[in-house]
Amino acid sequence: MLHRNLAGQRLLALFMLGWMLFNYPLLSLLEGAGDWFGLPAVYVYVFAAWALLILLMARIAEYPGKKPERHDAGRPATSSEPGK
């Protein structure tokens, strides 16, 4: 259950990152930036941001988080000998 919640939180944060990356004020900064690699800067930026979001989403879906460690500090130690 904890893994799903953590993955959900990460996907929500990724959605907000994508929303900010594709928001108008940031895209308008690149409108007159010229060419990158022979292509308009806006096209290169949109494609690179889109690819980054897909890679991050795949990473989150594949590895949602580490499994929590079991802490048995509150449990009494068990002995393997029958008389103890």
Image (cartoon, helix red, strand yellow):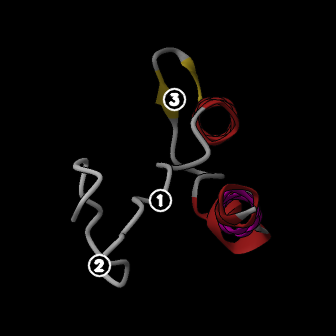
Q: Cα distance, mark 1 to mark 3? A: 48 Å
Nearest to viewer (mark 2 / mark 3)? 2
- Please tell me how crowded label 1 is: few (under 14), some (14-19), or many (20+) other residues with Cα within 10 Å: few
Quadrant in the rendering for residue 64: top right
Q: CA distance from mark 1 to mark 2?
A: 15 Å
Write down the region rendered in magenta. Answer: 7-20
Q: Nearer the viewer, residue 24 or 74?
A: 74
Residue at far front of view? 83
Q: How many marks?
A: 3
* Residue at image coords 58%, 53%: 30
Q: Position of residue 16 (x, y in %)?
A: 72, 69
Residue type indicated by callout 1: Pro
Task: From the image, tell me which residue sits under label 2.
Answer: 73
Image mark for residue 48: none
Query: Residue 7: image x %, image y %?
Result: 68, 56
Residue under pointer 3: 35
Element marked by disc 1: loop
Binning the other alpha carbons within 10 Å of mark 3 as few (below 14), some (14 to 19) or many (20 upward) gives few
| Relative side of 53 to 19, left or right | left
Which secondary structure lies at badge 2?
loop
Q: Identify which amino acid the numbered label 2 is placed on.
A: Ala
